[in-house]
Amino acid sequence: MIAPKMLIAAGVVGVAAIFGSQAYLDWSARNAANTRFEELESQIQSIRAADEGRAAELAKVVEAMQERFTLAATDAQKAASLARQEQTREASALRKIIDDHAKNVDSLREQSDAKLAAVRQETTTHFDEVNGQVSTVKTDLETTKTDLASNRREIGDVRDSLGRQIARNADELAVLKRRGERDYYEFDLTKAKAMERVAGIRLQLNRTDTKARKYDVTLQVDDKSLQKKGQLLNEPIQLLVGKDRVRYELVVNSIDKDRIRGYISTPKDTVIGGTLALQ
């Protein structure tokens, strides 16, 4: 039979073992909790440090951006100030140009007014002179008209006289020759390339029209030539020949195919070679 003391001791030892085991478990739990707490605290510290680092970087970035914005604002202000200064200078220069231009315009206007006044004065003077000259010309023109009318009458009289002196055939030509007032040189001209000389004048027949009683002829004295086209039968061709402009007269009395016959009358005893002129 087990003694009571032994039982008590065994109980105490068991209770102690139980309490010791529980204490160990509590210590282990506390120790694990502490370890976990320390780990968590370490993680928190690490996170906090990382956050602080990122916050510091963000602060630096913000500060750098603020500096950039500040520099940009400063540069913009400087650029705006320079632009205003440049605009002011340009406006001043443009204003000066406009003022100078206005002065030049005023000067040119004054010069133009002065020149215009001078031109007006000169024009008035010339106009008065021209009026005087026009009056003189009008007087001369009236005189010329009078002289022209007189000359026309004289020419008409001469033509009438010459008409009466034209020979239309051989009999009339013989009558004129007997009068002895002029010399008469007859010709019988056919169409040819070469010219024929009659009374100091060269003649060349170009064409005849027997139905219309017309002919074309070329007259030449020295180096001057004259073409007469559509000349009628018995129509006199009057010429002024030589330096003294002596009057010759050519008359055709007969027109055949490629052939004409007639005469040239000249002043008495005169056959002149020289300049040919149509009267």
Image (cartoon, rainbow, N blue to C red):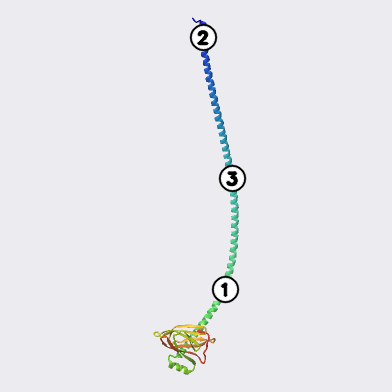
Q: Which residue is mark 1?
A: 126
Q: Is residue 116 left or right of residue 173?
A: right
Residue 31 makes an appearance in the image: yes
Pick whichever of labels 3 and 2 is earlier in the sequence.
2
Q: Quadrant of residue 101?
A: bottom right
Pick whichever of labels 1 and 3 is earlier in the sequence.
3
Q: Residue at x 52, y 11 (%)?
A: 13
Q: Which residue is mark 3?
A: 75
Residue 67: horizontal and vertical position, in percent?
59, 40
- Residue type at numbered disc 2: Ala
The kind of secondary structure element at disc 3 is helix
> In the orientation shown, which residue stands out farthest toward the bottom?
178
Q: Is residue 264 left or right of residue 49?
A: left
> In the orientation shown, which residue stands out farthest toward the top?
1
The kind of secondary structure element at disc 1 is helix
Q: Which residue is mark 2?
A: 10
Pick whichever of labels 1 and 2 is earlier in the sequence.
2
- Residue type at numbered disc 1: His
Residue 100: horizontal and vertical position, in percent?
60, 58
Nearer-the-camera pick, 3 or 227: 3
Q: Are marks 3 and 2 in contact (CB under 8 Å)?
A: no
In this figure, what is the number of numbered marks?
3
Residue 96: horizontal and vertical position, in percent?
60, 56
Q: CA distance from mark 1 to mark 2?
A: 167 Å
- Residue type at numbered disc 3: Asp
Q: Is residue 121 left or right of residue 202?
A: right
Q: Residue at x 52, y 13 (%)?
A: 17
Residue 256: horizontal and vertical position, in percent?
41, 87
